[in-house]
Image (cartoon, rainbow, N blue to C red):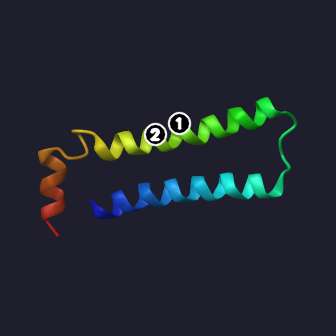
Amino acid sequence: MELVKRYLTDLQDMLCDEVLYDWGQGTGFQTKREMQKYNCGIAKAMELIDTILDSEEFHSPMFNQLRNMK
């Protein structure tokens, strides 16, 4: 289970890195609107990952049992 949690957290870090890289390059966006849509997409993806990590299902008895099997 920790592997899944680490993977999702690493995914969030990669999304942040991607935003910083694109901002630093200053290229790839034709308009401000395009840039805003991109940033909103990144924010939604990060929110989804947080929702998964905080969800009841992620901490359900089944997952807890798998976690304890190590």
Would you name the residue on which mark 2 appears?
47
Asked which quadrant contains residue 29, the reply is: top right
Quick one: label 1, few (<14), some, or many (20+) residues within 10 Å? few
Residue for point 16% across, 44% down: 60
**Would you say the residues marked 2 and 1 are in contact, meaning their CB atoms lie under 8 Å apart?**
yes
What label sits on residue 44 in the rendered view?
1
**Judging from the image, what secondary structure is the residue with disc 1 in?**
helix
**Judging from the image, what secondary structure is the residue with disc 2 in?**
helix
Q: Which quarter of the image is occupied by the N terminus?
A: bottom left
Question: Where is residue 16 drawn, in percent x and y?
Answer: 59, 54
Kindly give the residue lying farthest to the bottom in the view shown: 70
Question: Where is residue 70 drawn, in percent x and y?
Answer: 17, 70
Quick one: label 2, few (<14), some, or many (20+) residues within 10 Å? few
- In this rendering, the answer to whether 45 lies above or below 22 is above
Residue for point 85% across, 33% down: 31
Question: Where is residue 13 drawn, in percent x and y?
Answer: 53, 59
Asked which quadrant contains residue 52, the reply is: top left
Question: Could you tell whether 38 is left or right of 68 in the image?
Answer: right
What label sits on residue 58 in the rendered view?
none
Question: Where is residue 54 drawn, in percent x and y?
Answer: 29, 43
Identified by mark 1, the residue type is Lys
- In this rendering, the answer to whether 3 lies above or below 58 is below
Residue for point 11% across, 46% down: 61
Identified by mark 2, the residue type is Glu
- In this rendering, the answer to whether 67 lies above or below 50 is below
Q: How many numbered circles does the render carry?
A: 2
Question: Could you tell whether 66 is left or right of 44 in the image?
Answer: left
- In this rendering, the answer to whether 1 lies above or below 27 is below
Cα separation, mark 2 vs mark 1, equals 5 Å
Q: Which residue is more in the foreground, 1 or 42? A: 42
